[in-house]
């Protein structure tokens, strides 16, 4: 059973910010304070879509909601996964404009009004990602930050663009017509949504003034897990749009690209430990993506979009 908590239960605002979370007690408060500190010159609220947290996340959100009626807590543990959490949150709200960001990142100043303004002109919009505020320099060297100065190129089909759900906005009517995020994806569900929007005739507007400061995974283990999931999502996307098998097609050539930086790191590791760590992290992340791409179970069958009869 879903539960919406907060002072204003009956009325939904013009704009809703949906923040999916699973065991995000360590980071969600910083994100929520950044959201609630936004300008109040438009009609908006924030919904935390909790996907079954067991680490005290709900208590953190409830405590903040006591002092701000614009914050709501929504139990979306019915179906697991970020795509499902976002879909369920949209279904259980009614705001015209829907914004998405993540619980472990931090929105920049005026993010909500920037995205809301852009949605008055375009049906789907994406803002800029920044990795300099929340990550030490060493970690910034480990990971390429996408979407810093424009949209990303979709993994498939060729020629289309995509954007991360870490900084994404969409009008409710378009989201409904697309039947939301496809819940078959472990990752890349945001790319798939963007692709389907473009195939339906929409263009994604980039909003450089709408900044989200993202947090990079800090360990090799967490980075490897994330990369593996990225690889699985990339394969699902390529398969869905008939672009071939991205894993088997270029697996060895891409993995071999990591050898040179690793060899270079071995030579300078004593003098440049940060450089060596960066090279190692780059290699591990690449390997994770590639192995995820060739994982036999990466692509599931059926239609995982909202409203599908095949959906679990």
Image (cartoon, rainbow, N blue to C red):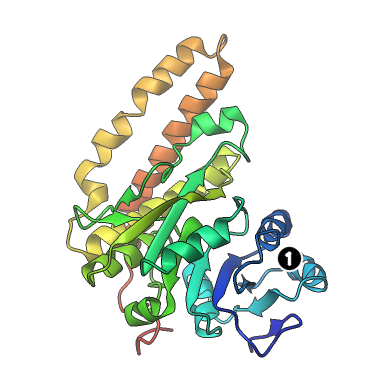
Picture residue at 57% right of the left edge, 33% below the top: 139
Q: Position of residue 242 (x, y in %)?
A: 17, 62
Per the image, the residue denoted by label 1 is 57
- Residue 287 is drawn in which quadrant? top left
Q: Position of residue 288 (x, y in %)?
A: 42, 44
Viewer-nearest residue: 48 or 302:
48
Picture residue at 63% right of the left edge, 65% below the top: 22
- Residue 311 is drawn in which quadrant? bottom left
- Of the 4 image quadrants, the one containing the C terminus is bottom left
Side of 113 relative to 118 (left or right) = right
Picture residue at 35% right of the left edge, 86% below the top: 308
Residue 281 to residue 309: above or below: above
Q: Position of residue 90 (x, y in %)?
A: 51, 79
Quick one: SS at disc 1? helix
Viewer-nearest residue: 290 or 72:
72
Side of 308 relative to 34 (left or right) = left
Viewer-nearest residue: 140 or 7:
7
The reply to whether residue 96 is visible in this rendering is yes
The reply to whether residue 101 is visible in this rendering is no
Viewer-nearest residue: 2 or 37:
37
């Amino acid at each position: 059973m879903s539960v919406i908590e907060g002072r204003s239960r009956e009325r939904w605002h013009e704009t809703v910010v949906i923040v999916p979370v699973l065991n995000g007690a360590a980071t969600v408060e910083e994100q929520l304070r950044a959201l609630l500190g936004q300008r109040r010159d438009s009609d908006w609220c924030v919904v935390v879509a909790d996907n079954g947290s067991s680490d005290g996340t709900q208590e953190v959100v409830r405590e903040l909601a006591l002092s701000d009626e614009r914050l709501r807590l929504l139990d979306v543990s019915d179906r697991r996964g970020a795509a499902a959490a976002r879909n369920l949150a949209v279904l259980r709200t009614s705001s015209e404009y829907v914004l998405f960001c993540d619980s472990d990142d931090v929105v920049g100043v005026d993010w909500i009004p920037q995205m809301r303004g852009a949605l008055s002109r375009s049906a789907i919009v994406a803002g800029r990602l920044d990795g300099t505020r929340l990550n030490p320099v060493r970690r910034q060297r480990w990971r390429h930050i996408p979407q810093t100065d424009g949209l990303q190129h979709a993994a498939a089909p060729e020629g289309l663009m995509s954007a991360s759900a870490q900084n994404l906005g969409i009008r409710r009517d378009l989201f409904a017509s697309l039947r939301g995020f496809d819940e078959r994806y472990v990752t890349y569900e945001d790319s798939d949504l963007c692709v389907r929007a473009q195939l339906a005739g929409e263009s994604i507007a980039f909003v450089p003034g709408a900044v989200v400061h993202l947090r990079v995974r800090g360990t090799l283990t967490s980075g490897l897990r994330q990369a593996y999931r990225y690889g699985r999502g990339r394969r699902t996307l390529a398969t869905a749009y008939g672009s071939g098998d991205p894993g088997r097609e270029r697996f060895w050539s891409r993995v071999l690209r990591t050898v040179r930086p690793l060899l270079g790191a071995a030579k300078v590791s004593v003098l440049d430990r940060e450089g060596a760590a960066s090279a190692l992290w780059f290699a591990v992340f690449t390997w994770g993506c590639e192995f995820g791409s060739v994982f036999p179970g990466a692509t599931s069958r059926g239609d995982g979009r909202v409203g599908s009869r095949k959906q679990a």
